[in-house]
Image (cartoon, grey):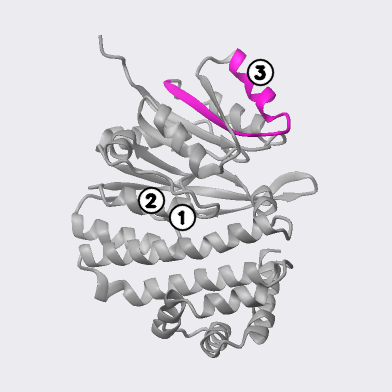
């Protein structure tokens, strides 16, 4: 007799999240949709994360724990996908939490429309007097798109505005992921963009819900990204440049395949320029030796030269950064990037 599929697999990669994993699991186990399985991939946690998860598993058999040595969230999510026995997949980060109707609303939308991917909005929380009261909402207009040409245009626009970044707040079809062998590549930052670009190549429709059901704890994510100034962190930063190369190849391939190259290439170039600037900004804030040399090497890379030569910029500070990159004025560039970082921090306050 064929095993009946669970409706939704919720995959949670976790590493040393003892402060937040309980809130995350409580929000999932309290969903009004009960036909779920919860796959927690413990990525080599060294704190009490695993023991907390095990206590929840004793109370609720829908939880499955997979333990692996510390390999990063990409490998953890891939392991979760392998284990999933469901029609749909949701990814939740261990420091986030979801509204009680999150699963049921996304599932209902997918089931009613037979769509291949469902998006919803997010609330972004910052700590405020040891609480999580400060937030902003990221929402978009409701959309239902099945026309191929409109779908491809909208997906490229989502890539440009950043909506395709991250696997959270999105419902995926398990069959599309597994049949096309779609994986999260082993990057320490932003591997989810590549996953989403591979996924959207195989879809025929999307649904966008203009409401927020997913809650992001920003402070924890920033702490994890702003690691110590050590060699390992530098390697993770260097890894991000390789990611930009992958993105350049993948998105340009989609633009050509979907006959949208002329329409969107300028906006895509600008998106990649901002990613490159963000990468250099992170590098410039790292105090490991030879940072100047590494930045100079990046400025001489073929991809960097291509982006700098082709991008069309109107914002003055970006024009200055572009000029310094073009001239390879590393010391002035680092100063400008640090100023850019200061401006970003002020805007977040």
Please determine whether, in this image, residue 107 is positioned above or below residue 188. Answer: above
Q: Is residue 259 left or right of residue 242?
A: left
Query: Which residue lies at the image location 33% right of the left edge and 43% below the top edge?
Result: 117
Q: Let me know if residue 49 is in the magenta part.
A: yes
Disc 1, SS: loop
Disc 2, SS: helix
Q: Which mark, by number, is residue 120? A: none
Using a 10 Å C-alpha cutoff, classify the residue at mark 2 as few (fewer than 14 neighbours), some (14 to 19) or many (20 or more): many
Q: Indicate which disc, 2 or 3, sits on the residue closer to the N terminus.
A: 3
Query: Which residue lies at the image location 55% right of the left edge and 87% below the top edge?
Result: 316
Using a 10 Å C-alpha cutoff, classify the residue at mark 3 as few (fewer than 14 neighbours), some (14 to 19) or many (20 or more): few
User: Which residue in the structure is indicated by mark 1?
Assistant: 165
Using a 10 Å C-alpha cutoff, classify the residue at mark 1 as few (fewer than 14 neighbours), some (14 to 19) or many (20 or more): some
Q: Which mark, by number, is residue 55? A: 3
335 or 301: which is nearer to us?
A: 301
User: Which residue in the structure is indicated by mark 2?
Assistant: 196
Q: Indicate which disc, 1 or 3, sits on the residue closer to the N terminus.
A: 3
Please determine whether, in this image, residue 59 is positioned above or below residue 147. Answer: above
Cβ atoms at labels 1 and 3 below 8 Å apart: no
How many discs appear? 3
Residue 297 x %, y %: 55, 76
């Amino acid at each position: 007799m064929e095993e009946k599929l669970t409706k939704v697999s919720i995959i949670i990669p976790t590493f040393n999240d003892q402060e937040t994993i309980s809130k995350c699991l409580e929000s999932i186990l309290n969903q009004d949709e009960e036909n779920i399985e919860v796959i927690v991939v413990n990525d080599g946690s060294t704190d009490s994360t695993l023991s907390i998860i095990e206590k929840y598993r004793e109370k609720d058999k829908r939880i499955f724990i997979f333990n692996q040595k510390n390999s990063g969230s990409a490998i953890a999510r891939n392991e979760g996908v392998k284990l999933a026995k469901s029609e749909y997949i949701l990814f939740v980060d261990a420091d986030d939490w979801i509204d009680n109707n999150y699963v049921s609303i996304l599932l209902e939308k997918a089931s009613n429309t037979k769509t291949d991917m469902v998006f919803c909005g997010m609330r972004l929380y910052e700590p405020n007097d040891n609480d999580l009261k400060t937030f902003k909402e990221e929402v978009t207009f409701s959309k239902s798109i099945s026309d191929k040409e409109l779908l491809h245009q909208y997906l490229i626009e989502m890539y440009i505005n950043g909506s395709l970044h991250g696997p959270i707040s999105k419902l995926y079809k398990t069959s599309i992921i597994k049949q096309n062998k779609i994986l999260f590549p082993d990057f320490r930052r932003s591997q989810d963009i590549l996953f989403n670009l591979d996924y959207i190549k195989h879809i025929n429709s999307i649904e966008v819900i203009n409401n927020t059901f997913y809650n992001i704890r920003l402070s924890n994510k920033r702490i994890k990204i702003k690691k110590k100034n050590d060699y390992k962190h530098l390697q993770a930063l260097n890894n991000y440049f390789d990611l930009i190369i992958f993105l350049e190849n993948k998105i340009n391939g989609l633009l050509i395949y979907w006959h949208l190259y002329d329409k969107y290439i300028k906006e895509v170039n600008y998106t990649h320029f901002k990613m490159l600037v963000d990468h250099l900004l992170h590098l410039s804030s790292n105090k490991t030796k030879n940072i100047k040399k590494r930045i100079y090497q990046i400025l001489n890379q073929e991809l960097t030269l291509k982006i700098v030569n082709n991008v069309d910029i109107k914002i003055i500070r970006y024009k200055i950064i572009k000029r310094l990159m073009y001239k390879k004025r590393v010391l002035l560039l680092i100063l400008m990037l640090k100023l850019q970082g200061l401006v970003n921090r002020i805007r977040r306050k």
